[in-house]
Image (cartoon, helix red, strand yellow):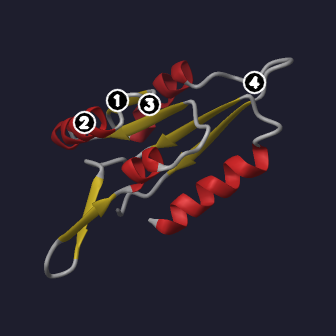
Amino acid sequence: MRIVQDYLAAYVGQLAGRADDFTLVDLYAGNGLYSMGTRRERFAGSALAALGQDLPIHRYIFCEAEADQLGALKVRVNRHFRRKHVILLEGRPEHLLEKIKLYAPASRQGFASSLICLCDPFS
């Protein structure tokens, strides 16, 4: 997860003076947690790790195909990141493109919008 966090920080840092608005889309947000190892150690997944960073990201769009996973993510977001602008979308990524476009502002004259998309279906 550290790689994703470092990349997000570098991306936002490079565009900080050139973009007015940042949107992060995670197409496979899951329930917000990963577990691994024989002890099933749990740690923040990409969605919760991104929310935990102090970056000037204006909105977070988290997508998940499974309703129970999205429900668990919603509880975790509401418990720990209530003040962040988070949009949760249920469905497969290929069916959510139009909805994502509704929430992510387009660049126009005098306003630069930046969108970064995480896509890790194997997490």
Tags 2 and 1 touching, CB below 8 Å? yes
Looking at the image, residue 3 lies above or below residue 46: below
Measuring 78% from the left and 28% from the top, which residue is drawn there? 112
Disc 4 designates what residue? 107
Type of residue at label 1? Arg
Disc 1 designates what residue? 82
Type of residue at label 4? Ser
Measuring 82% from the left and 39% from the top, which residue is drawn there? 17
Type of residue at label 2? Arg
Sequence-wise first label, 4 or 3: 3
Tags 3 and 1 touching, CB below 8 Å? yes
Callout 1: helix, strand or loop?
loop
Looking at the image, residue 37 lies above or below residue 114: below
Q: Residue furthest right?
A: 109
Callout 2: helix, strand or loop?
helix
Tags 4 and 3 touching, CB below 8 Å? no
Question: How far is disc 3 from disc 2 in space, using C-alphas?
Answer: 11 Å
